[in-house]
Image (cartoon, rainbow, N blue to C red):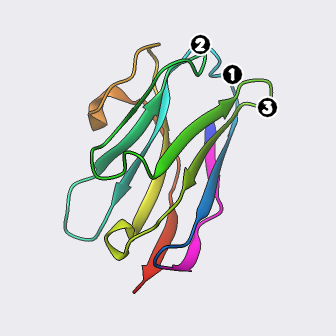
């Protein structure tokens, strides 16, 4: 059974940092794009960023560009999201995702595997 399990969420003050991790099990994703989405209540899930299968290419939403960094460790089947200079509007549930393809998509439908999410709350 394929599982993506996020960790590292929590409460942080504005301007602070958090590092999310996503541990994958059940299969390797070393040939697949992975990424992060986020969602706040009553809104659609929003693409945060994605990373190519080998980590060479990353894409970010304009809202997080320059503040968030995605990385991966294929040897450990783990994905990371370093979040700096956090703002209250970054408050959301963050989801780790993995695609069946090698390319980075920006849509919910581009990803076949989803974690259950981890809450990030940024206080002002």
Residue at the extreme right of the image, as rendered:
75
The label nearer to you, 1 versus 3, is 3
Which residue shows up at 29% across the image and 52% down it? 63
Q: Earlier in the sequence, mark 3 or mark 2?
A: 2
Location of the C terminus by quadrant is bottom left
Which residue shows up at 33% across the image and 25% down it? 105
Please give left or right for residue 47 compared with residue 43 in the image.
right
Q: Residues within 10 Å of mark 2 (few under 14, many from 20)?
A: some
x and y, in percent, of residue 69 in the image: 53, 43
Q: Residues within 10 Å of mark 1 (few under 14, many from 20)?
A: some
Please give left or right for residue 2 compared with residue 48 in the image.
right
Q: Earlier in the sequence, mark 1 or mark 3?
A: 1
Please give left or right for residue 45 compared with residue 81 in the image.
left
The answer to whether residue 90 is visible is yes
Look at the image and give the residue range highlighted in magenta: 4-13
Location of the N terminus by quadrant is top right
Which residue shows up at 68% across the image and 24% down it? 27
Which residue shows up at 45% across the image and 67% down it? 86
Q: Is residue 8 magenta?
A: yes
Secondary-structure class at tag 2: loop
Which residue bears the numbered disc 3? 76
Q: Answer above or below: position of 87 versus 84.
A: below
Secondary-structure class at tag 1: loop
Which residue bears the numbered disc 1? 28
The label nearer to you, 1 versus 2, is 2
Q: Looking at the rendered structure, which numbered label has been put on residue 31?
A: 2
Q: How many marks?
A: 3
Q: Is residue 81 magenta?
A: no
Disc 1/disc 3 C-alpha distance (Å): 9 Å
Disc 1/disc 2 C-alpha distance (Å): 8 Å
């Amino acid at each position: 059974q394929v599982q993506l399990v996020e960790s590292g969420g929590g409460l942080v003050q504005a301007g602070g940092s958090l590092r999310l991790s996503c541990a994958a099990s059940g299969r390797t994703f070393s040939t697949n794009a992975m990424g992060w989405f986020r969602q706040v209540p009553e809104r659609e899930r929003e693409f945060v960023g994605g990373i190519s299968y080998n980590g060479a290419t990353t894409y970010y939403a304009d809202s997080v560009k320059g503040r968030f960094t995605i990385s991966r460790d294929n040897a450990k089947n783990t994905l990371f999201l370093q979040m700096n200079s956090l703002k209250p509007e970054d408050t959301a549930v963050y989801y780790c995702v993995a695609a069946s393809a090698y390319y980075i998509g920006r849509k919910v439908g581009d990803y076949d595997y989803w974690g259950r999410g981890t809450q990030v709350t940024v206080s002002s």
